[in-house]
Image (cartoon, rainbow, N blue to C red):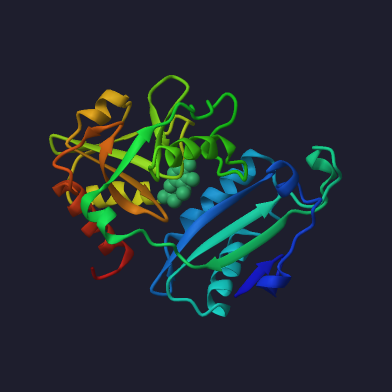
Amino acid sequence: MKIYIDGEFYAKEDAKISVFDHGLLYGDGIFEGIRVYNGTVFRLAEHIDRLFSSAQAILLDIGMTRADVMKAVEDTVKVNERENAYIRLVVTRGVGDLGINPYLCKKSSVIIIVGDISLYPEEFYKNGIAIITSSVRRISPDQFDTRIKSLNYLNNILAKIEAVQAGCMEAVMLASDGYVAECTADNIFVVKKGIVYTPHSHGSSLEGITRGAVIDAAGNLKIECRENRLTQYDLYISDEVFITGTGAEIMPVTKIDGRVIGNGECGPVTASLRKEFWKIVGINK
Ligand code: PMP
């Protein structure tokens, strides 16, 4: 494994950053999780746009152009000779002193890791998964806009702890106004009477790249898809629920807080969106 750090490639054992990097000390930095399918980086330009928007929002100078970052990602995939992989692209504030002042960090660091994808068991996609609603609310946009994909994931991690303690792999997080925001590392969709709904970001959820691909897939299939306000009630009474993310792709949810959704299997609309998603990705499944 060859890891990119600031223009150089390092073996895994030698890929190290300073303990004074504010990415470590304060979670001061941003990241992207990206998939490689059959040697092609999926929606790379969109990931780079989101990365640069996150950087703009937190006044972080990446020190590279978009084209440079894209090339660095592609080069790292190439040197690692990977056809299918998960890429972690990280930009930290860089080395500073022990105070939080980001202006004392001279130069940001760009790190690119091309690693394995931890695939979920096929039965999760067939039978769906059970999730819970977390008691941890998503941070409100007046505190921190969660469209920024920052290195500080503690809000999500606290909700993930609740999910794991309940024996689930995901949890729904409500926004501060009580409406559904997203899951700890995935966006959420519901299907009711043939119409697909997903919460509008409203600054309380990440604008997922997979979410965007699902909205495109629905458009291709002429299935109506609306960004709407959703409550827990909307989740409970829906015909189908699924979550989306770079790792999970499109995963059906068949139980929420003990309520069975649909017939306990992947629903027909979710199944056709999954098929169309594979077409968009360019994979024969
Ligand atoms: N929400 C959160 C909080 C996330 O961390 C992620 C990424 N894992 C997503 C949604 C899904 O986004 P994407 O489709 O870009 O992976």
* Total marks placed: 0
Q: Is residue 244 above or below residue 136?
A: below
Answer left or right for 95 relative to 90. Answer: right
The percent position of residue 210, horizontal first and vertical second, equals: 38, 51
Picture residue at 42% right of the left edge, 63% below the top = 42
- The front one of 205 and 221 is 205
Residue found at x 79% / y 57%:
18
**Left or right of residue 119: residue 28:** right
Question: In which quadrant of the rendered view does residue 145 lie?
Answer: top right
User: Whole-percent x and y of residue 260?
Assistant: 20, 35
Residue placed furthest toward the top? 177
Across and down, in percent, residue 35 comes to 44, 62
Please report the residue visible at 55 percent of the width from the left and 68 percent of the height from the top.
114
Q: Which image quadrant: the C terminus?
A: bottom left
Residue drawn 39% across the image and 62% down it: 119
- In this rendered view, identify the residue nearer to me: 23 or 57: 23
Q: Is residue 207 visible?
A: no
Q: Quadrant of the N terminus?
A: bottom right
Say whether residue 74 is left or right of residue 195.
right
Residue 56: where, in percent of width, then height? Answer: 63, 43
